[in-house]
Each structure stands twice: as structure tokens, then as C-alpha cells.
Image (spheres, helix red, strand yellow):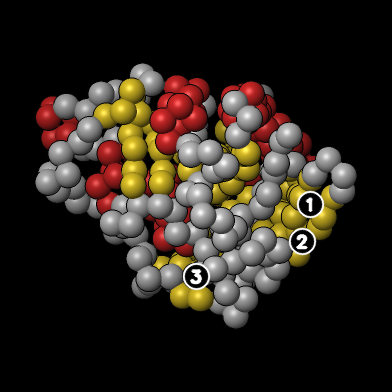
Amino acid sequence: MSKHINNNNDHETITQSALPVINVLHDHATIMEIEEESSSQQTWRRVMSPEIVEVEEAQENGSVISTRDVVDVFVAVGKHDMDVVKWAIDHAVAPEARVYLVHVFSPVTHIQTPVGKLSRSQLSKEQVQIYINEENNKRRSLLQKYIRLCTDAKIGVETMLLESNNTTKAILDLISVVNITKLVIGTKRAPSLRRLRKGPGKGEFVKKNAPNFCEVSIIHNGKQVNIDQQRHVAGVTPTNAPTTSQNGLKVSTLQPERKFFECACFSRNFD
């Protein structure tokens, strides 16, 4: 269970979830208390912006990934990405490597009620909390099916939640923040010239704009899609030179919007 307090001029939110949250922040401070679950104990960590102050896992070269020789695989997952996770397990995960399930969800700004969709500011804290708890339970249930695939294959698995209105931008920044070198992401429709003329899908956009050090595999219907790397796709360029905080964790600062990405990797191992 975690407690996430989000302070700004408009509202204060307290959410509870068994999953850690990585936040894309916009001009406000965030304090998080993360409870890390394991079979034998529970560990609380206090994380304050603008820097992550406690990360127990060994860090090298600013990466939040442990200093092992194997390359861990990050898999971006949405509601219907079983084929993406299966492909990653079968083709991308080396022995002893871990899978990091990355899920992006939107901040709560409006809530559906019997009288229609209302702004969260129009509801009481109790009503907002009930909705947030319901959404947390849905995310937990969603990720559990992907976690089960990994554990059945005897692969270590951890979860990373990103709160952002821009899925592709959040993933692109995450690549630089945690030095992701292998990313697997799905696409719902096979790329085509017509589709590319209309604009790339999320997977194609991430692949086109990812840093050179990151290998991005796009999966469609359980098969890898090859995309012409020479086609230019205009869009947001991720921050490629994250700064290093005093504890060694890289924090990517986005200018000039004064946005920054605060990130830590929290273990969630399932034996």
C-alpha cells in the first residue's frame, strides 16, 4: 500500500495503492510514502521532490537498475497487451533478467457520477478518495494478469506506474531517467504508409524518438513490427541529458516548461 500526497494550489489528494507511482510533475511539489511489499516484511520509503532521497537498490552510472550484468526488459502495458508481454518473455528476456511492467495512467481531474461528469473540485475528499481507490483496484487487477505471465515463466517482475496526460512523452522521458536499453511496446494496428501519413501510433512514435542507446521493439498481434528508421516523425523530443541528484539518481529536467520527472524503481518481486 502506498500513500501519495499531491499538493498544489487547487487540491490535495491522498491516494492508496499497493503499487508504486512515478510522477510527471508540473510546477508543484510531491511527497510520497511508498510501502514496499515482500513475503517477509514491508518497508516504508519517504520520497520528496525534487529529488529521490532513498533508493536502497545498488546504483551505478545514475541508473536505478541494479548493477547486474544482464539487461532488464521494460514492457509498456495498457489494457490489452497480453501478446506484448508474451512476446517479451519469449524473445526479449535473457536468463536472470527482470521484466519491468510500465503502465501510464492519467491524473484524476474529472469523475463520472450519476448526474454526469464532475470536476474533482466539485466533490468531497471522501468521494474523490472512493473513486481513486476504485481506479487503483482496476490497475492492480490489470497488472496482475501480466505479473502472472511472468511468474509462470519464472521471471522476476516489477511494476512501475507513471501518472501523466501524455503517454508517449512519459515513456520517452522514463527511458532517459532510468537508462532503459531494451523496451517492448505494443501497437493496435499494423503500421502502413496510410497510417503513418495520418500520424504514428504510440509505439511507432516512441521508437522514432527514443535515444539511440534504447532498443525499442514494437509488437502487433504477438509479432514484432519492423519500421523504416529513415522515416521522420515530428514530435516531442525527450530529454537526453538528465542531471544527477545528490544521491546518484538521475533526474530529468524538462525546460522551458519547468516540468521535471521524478522517478525511482521499487521492487515488487513475486516468487
Q: In which quarter of the image is residue 100?
A: top right
**Residue matched to label 3:** 61
Quadrant (top left/top right/bottom left/bottom right) for the C terminus? top right
Q: Which of marks 3 and 2 is nearer the N terminus?
A: 2
- The residue positioned farthest toward the right in the image shown: 40
Give the number of callouts.
3
In this image, 32 relative to 202: left or right? Answer: right
Binning the other alpha carbons within 10 Å of mark 2 as few (below 14), some (14 to 19) or many (20 upward) gives some
How far apart marks 1 and 2 lie (CA) works out to 6 Å
Binning the other alpha carbons within 10 Å of mark 1 as few (below 14), some (14 to 19) or many (20 upward) gives some
Residue at image coords 12%, 46%:
230
Residue at image coords 62%, 76%:
247
Q: Do the residues labelled 3 and 1 touch (CB within 8 Å)?
A: no
**Residue matched to label 2:** 45
Q: Which element is circle 2 on?
A: strand
Which residue is nearer to you in this view: 238 or 269? 269
Residue at image coords 53%, 38%:
95
How far apart marks 3 and 1 lie (CA) works out to 26 Å
Quadrant (top left/top right/bottom left/bottom right) for the N terminus? top right
Which residue is nearer to you in this view: 225 or 206? 225
Q: Closer to us: mark 3 or mark 2?
A: 3
How far apart marks 3 and 2 lie (CA) works out to 22 Å
> What x and y, as percent, mark residue 55?
68, 64
**Residue matched to label 1:** 35
Three-letter residue code for mark 2: Arg
Q: Earlier in the sequence, mark 3 or mark 1?
A: 1
Vertical placement of 115 versus 185: above or below? above
Which residue is nearer to you in this view: 14 or 32? 32
